[in-house]
Amino acid sequence: MVSTALKKNNFQNDIGTVETKYYTFAHPPNELVLECGERLGPITLAYETYGRLDARRSNAILILHALSGDAHAAGVHGADGATGWWEEMIGPGKGFDTNKYFVICSNIIGGCKGSTGPAAINPTTGRPYALGFPFITIADMVNTQRRLIDHLGIDRLLCVAGGSMGGMQVLQWAASYPERVRAAIPIATALKHSPQQIAFNEVVRQSIMADPAWRKGDYYDHGQPEKGLAVARMIGHITFMSDRSMEEKFSRRLKNGVFSFNFDADFEVEGYLRYRGANFVKRFDANSYLYITKAMDYLDLSAGRLIRQDKLIATRFLVISFSSDWLYPSYQSQEIVRELKGRQVDVAYCELKSTYGHDAFLVETAEQTELIRNFLRVTQQGYHSWPGRGTTVGGFA
């Protein structure tokens, strides 16, 4: 159990006002070669930092965001007062304690929150890339993040951590640059998408592309394909919640107490989905949604691809899943654990009980704080003192 004092501390000790920074690299003729074979440059990454880098540059933690996330993970933006998407986990005294750690979060390549993506200007044409933007992978995202870490003068990260697609990036960091990652925390994620997960993403993409306003991706002079993107996000929110959480939040309650006998939103859950969809189109680019979901579908670190047979790595892992998450169910986290244990990697696993579904990694912060705080503390002390070395928690063997 987490004490009331700890919970109070988590909410009171905030970072304060933060500013998004930008790093541009891969200028021609030194463009980045992507996995698809195309070259891209220059590339800009938006990022934020919290806390201070110590003299040995040994306390850096990279936070990796999910599909619709961005670099603004914590603190408050002075311009609009927006709080970070993981505010309850990052800050003084929190799970990622900025009194101890230097925390970094960047917007991924292909995104639309300051980093180079389909909405960015193609220097060759002077117009948005649109579908001229090359296809990207999770590995490409990690390669650009590595460039940012180099720019910040950090040789080795104390930890990489993230949930959902952020967890995929965590795994890719361990696969691509194990020598530069001391610890990894993949949360509510998978080594690869199942057919069902790919199917959900395909329905999402088709809903966007079926909107006439999409204009084959060339809509920047005309406005977003709002209807298609809103439906895509509505589908997403259904998968983020569990059956129980939807029952508890909405049940079959009517918005106005009686049926309208038309196609307005009669039920509260209908109104909620429409509200979420309408708000999402104001802050996210439809083409970015297409590219990022495709990158997620392409990832496959199963069958020995996570840790190559010819490699022994010192990276230690904390894998977290949630009992009610049916989008990234616990068996997929257990597959990660099996893969790691098969390569003699130091790994601990915990399935947290929750009714919130996939959203739990953003909501169930108290339990995650305890786990992550202890894991990071022992990581800093050294691998060999870790009491859970090679063990699992939460009933998985």
Image (spheres, rainbow, N blue to C red):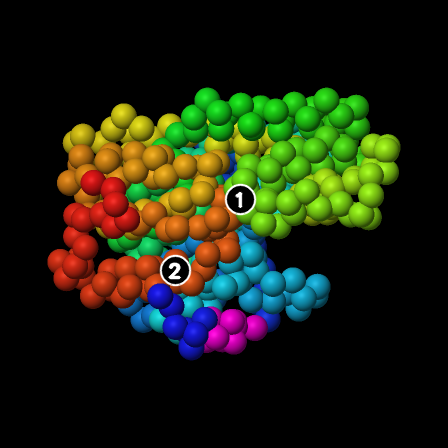
Of pointers 1 and 2, the one earlier in the residue sequence = 1
Q: Nearer the viewer, mark 1 or mark 2?
A: 1
Residue drawn 62% across and 50% down?
249
Q: Count residues near mark 1 (Cα–Cα under 10 Å), then give few for <14, some for 14-19, many for 20+.
A: some
Which residue is disc 1 drawn over? 244
SS at mark 1 in the image: helix
**Identity, as a three-letter code, of the amino acid under mark 2:** Glu
Whether the magenta-drawn stretch holds residue 95 is answered as no
Chain part drawn in magenta: 8-16
**Identity, as a three-letter code, of the amino acid under mark 1:** Arg
- What is the x, y in percent for residue 325? 45, 41
- Viewed as shown, does residue 49 lie left or right of 339? right
Q: Are marks 1 and 2 in contact (CB under 8 Å)?
A: no
Q: Between residues 142 and 10, which one lies in front from this camera angle?
A: 10
Whether the magenta-drawn stretch holds residue 11 is answered as yes
Which residue is disc 2 drawn over? 367
Q: Is residue 370 above or below residue 325?
A: below
Q: Quadrant of residue 110?
A: top right
- What is the x, y in percent for residue 290? 61, 30
Q: Between residues 42 and 352, which one lies in front from this camera angle?
A: 352
Q: Is residue 150 above or below residue 97?
A: above
Q: Which mark is residue 373?
A: none
SS at mark 2 in the image: helix
Q: Is residue 67 above or below residue 56?
A: above
Task: Tell me, yes or no, if residue 269 can be seen here.
Answer: yes
3D distance between C-alphas at marks 1 and 2: 20 Å
Residue drawn 34% across and 30% down?
301
Task: Tell me, yes or no, if residue 125 can be seen here.
Answer: no
Q: Between residues 303 and 179, which one lies in front from this camera angle?
A: 303
Q: Quadrant of residue 280?
A: top right
Residue drawn 44% across and 54% down?
63
Residue, far front:
258
